[in-house]
Image (tube, grey):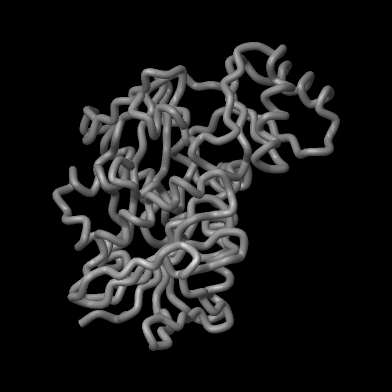
Amino acid sequence: MSRYRSIAVIYGSDTSESEVSCRSGEFVSSRIDGNKYDIYEIFARFGRWSLVACRKRSSMKVTFPEGARPEVDKNDFSVNVLGEKVKFDFAYIVQHGAPGENGLLQGYLEMLGVPFSTCSAYVSTIAFDKYACKSYLRGMGGVRFAPDAFVREGMDLEKFVGEASSKLRFPVFVKPTQGGSSFGVSKVDSPDGLAAAVKFAFSEGASVLVEQGVSGRELTVAAYRTNGEVKALPPIEIVTDNDYFDYDAKYNGHSQEICPAQLSPEILSELSETTCRIYSHLGCRGVVRVDYILAEDGLYFLEVNTIPGMTSASLVPKMVAAAGIDMTEFLSGIIESA
């Protein structure tokens, strides 16, 4: 017997990741068990939330044309549709970027008392900011962190470039502290290009992290909680045709994603254990993906993704398949464990 009846799948976002978010949301909606739940797809962007489609249990999907989509009432998280007022009793959040990944949407749902699929507002806020997350995890032990430098918009950029250039070895990676899908990210090979790369990253947010590049194998692992236990999915190794795993490599087929990654039993065990410890240390919920570089001197943490991509080509669905888990059953487990 399901704990919930009306599942609202929320996608779209206020950032550059909106298109990817829509693709993730549509995939998740199509895989949630339609025999257990009524499924409602909500497109949410810049404060306007509208119902894109709905599928009542064991019924056909009804899609609403743009311009005739019912508006979601944010006072009580409900919608009037087909002559019925539906109050959603669970939210499956697939909003990459703000406000779904930085804790704002979670805070709204927490105030209404509506359960949801992701980390809490507090944890989401910490994990979404790359610099804050690294700072939170530094004392955990068992994983390395690349040397870095932090700059906020309005600080003396010329002074920062000088200090960062003397502190870090090049190449470095310049990235907005908040955001994903590699928007605003640059690889910089010499100090001459650092100021321009920081300004480019500022186009995605007001703070920027500059990290010293680490050579090695790029690996990613997802963890989730089931029956009260944190478990890791099979890891993936990413081998890109591009200079690094940028947006083009992620979404336009210019990378090879080896799943499961061909690793020694010792490294596999270390990856799984470290990912589960990070998940527990942060206090995560739902499915969370952690990215690493495996260098000669050990495992380096890159970042945590509390709402990882869930398109048909995304990494987590590939991990779920490699684990031999049916995607519909996996999503039911996320929902019922919330």
Examine the rendered structure and indicate whether residue 160 appears above or below residue 178. Answer: above
Examine the rendered structure and indicate whether residue 312 appears above or below residue 28. Answer: above
- Side of 90 where 164 appears, left or right: right
Examine the rendered structure and indicate whether residue 314 appears above or below residue 187. Answer: below
Percent from the top left, x then y, of residue 68?
47, 70
Where residue 94 sits, quadrant-wise, is bottom left
- Side of 260 where 39 appears, left or right: right
Q: Which is more toward the observer, 53 or 276?
A: 53
Percent from the top left, x then y, of residue 307?
44, 53
Percent from the top left, x then y, of residue 148?
63, 29
Where residue 62 sits, quadrant-wise, is bottom left
| Direction left: furthest residue | 324
| Rendered residue at 39%/47% (across/down) | 309
| Rendered residue at 62%/15% (across/down) | 169
Percent from the top left, x then y, of residue 32?
26, 64
Q: Which is more toward the observer, 169 or 44?
A: 44
| Direction bottom: furthest residue | 84
In which quadrant will I find the N terminus? Answer: bottom left
Q: Which is more toward the observer, 335 or 275?
A: 335
| Rendered residue at 49%/51% (across/down) | 96
Q: How many labels does the image show?
A: 0
Examine the rendered structure and indicate whether residue 273 appears above or below residue 51. Answer: above
| Rendered residue at 53%/33% (across/down) | 145
In which quadrant will I find the C terminus? Answer: bottom left
Q: Which is more toward the observer, 169 or 200?
A: 200
